[in-house]
Image: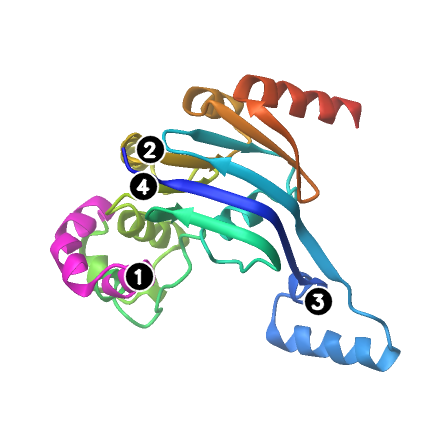
């Protein structure tokens, strides 16, 4: 077993409240101008607050919390997608993340061409992607559409191709955000088997989910998030109990 490790010391992460609320560049700029004219101060959102923890080799960690509690932000921070504002983040090992699967496609390029493009985004070499191309094509099972432009795909077809690409190779540290809906029942069965294989092969797993059954079946440790803070860290069953009691208290 390698010395794969996640070490976080007093992690804080902020992002602009304007950028968080607005969906388009036009509306973002418009809001910024309106705020400036009214002389209103823009307050950043404190998304992760003073998080310190260690996750070592062999650990399977489940993340619990209400929507907006900070679970997805935490995962994206671990993946290096969100830069931290202060503190120290050290992740030792190859990270593979499964979230935002439909991002990173070139709509005018074919599915086959996007296999190469998305592989590059995942940090994989062109030669590696060419070696895995036929396996990815077979797993996605898109038929002749693999040579059609991505813009002709349905949302489900895009997710199927993205899933096939993203799971073509595992990682020592696997980050999962919820259950992936990837199409019909046959494909979902294949997707579940592929995820379980990746989980078994990974040395560290961090899984965010509202499915208590999946968490107890896969994870031993649980982290409960609330408003960007970890309010409980312990055994997964104790974590679920704590989270359920906190919901009942509200």
Q: Which circle's residue, 4 or 1, is located before the other in the chain?
A: 1
Q: Please name which of the two marks, 2 or 4, marks the residue nearer to the observer.
A: 4
Q: Secondary structure at mark 2?
A: helix
Q: In this image, 132 relative to 246: left or right?
A: left
Q: In this image, 95 relative to 127: left or right?
A: right
Q: Quadrant of the C terminus?
A: top right
Q: Residue at x 46, y 22 (%)?
A: 220
Q: Quadrant of the N terminus?
A: top left
Mark pair 2, 1: CA separation: 22 Å
Can residue 129 be found in the magenta stretch? yes
Within 10 Å of the Cα at label 3, are there few (<14), some (14-19), or many (20+) other Cα atoms? some
Within 10 Å of the Cα at label 4, are there few (<14), some (14-19), or many (20+) other Cα atoms? many
Q: Which circle's residue, 2 or 4, is located before the other in the chain?
A: 4
Residue 144's tag is: none
Residue 18's tag is: 3
Q: Secondary structure at mark 3?
A: helix
Residue occupied by mark 4 = 172
Mark pair 3, 2: CA separation: 37 Å
Q: Main secondary structure of the magenta part?
A: helix
Within 10 Å of the Cα at label 2, are there few (<14), some (14-19), or many (20+) other Cα atoms? many
Comparing 120 with 12, the one in front is 12
Q: Residue at x 22, y 58 (%)?
A: 146
Mark pair 3, 1: CA separation: 29 Å
The relative height of residue 207 versus residue 162 in the rendered view (above or below) is above
Residue occupied by mark 2 = 199
Mark pair 2, 4: CA separation: 9 Å
């Amino acid at each position: 077993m390698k010395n794969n490790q996640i070490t976080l010391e007093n992690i804080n992460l902020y992002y602009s409240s304007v950028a968080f609320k607005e969906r388009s560049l036009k509306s973002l700029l418009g809001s910024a101008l309106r705020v400036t004219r009214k002389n209103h101060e823009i307050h950043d959102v404190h998304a992760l607050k003073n998080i310190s923890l260690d996750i070592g080799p062999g650990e399977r960690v489940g993340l619990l919390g209400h929507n907006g509690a900070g679970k997805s932000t935490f995962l994206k921070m671990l993946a290096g997608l969100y830069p931290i504002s202060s503190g120290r983040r050290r992740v030792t090992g190859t990270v593979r993340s499964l979230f935002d699967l439909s991002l990173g496609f070139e709509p005018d390029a074919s599915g086959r061409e996007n296999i190469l493009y998305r592989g590059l985004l995942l940090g994989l070499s062109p030669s590696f992607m060419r070696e895995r191309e036929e396996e990815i094509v077979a797993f996605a099972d898109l038929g002749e559409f693999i040579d059609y432009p991505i813009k002709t795909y349905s949302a489900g077809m895009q997710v199927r191709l993205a899933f096939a690409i993203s799971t073509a190779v595992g990682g020592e540290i696997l980050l999962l955000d919820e259950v992936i809906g990837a199409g019909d029942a046959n494909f979902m069965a294949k997707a579940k088997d592929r995820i379980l294989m990746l989980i078994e092969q990974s040395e560290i797993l961090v899984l965010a989910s509202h499915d208590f059954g999946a968490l107890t079946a896969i994870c031993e440790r649980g982290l409960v998030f609330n408003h960007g803070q970890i309010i409980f860290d312990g055994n997964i069953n104790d974590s679920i109990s704590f989270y359920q009691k906190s919901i009942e208290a509200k």
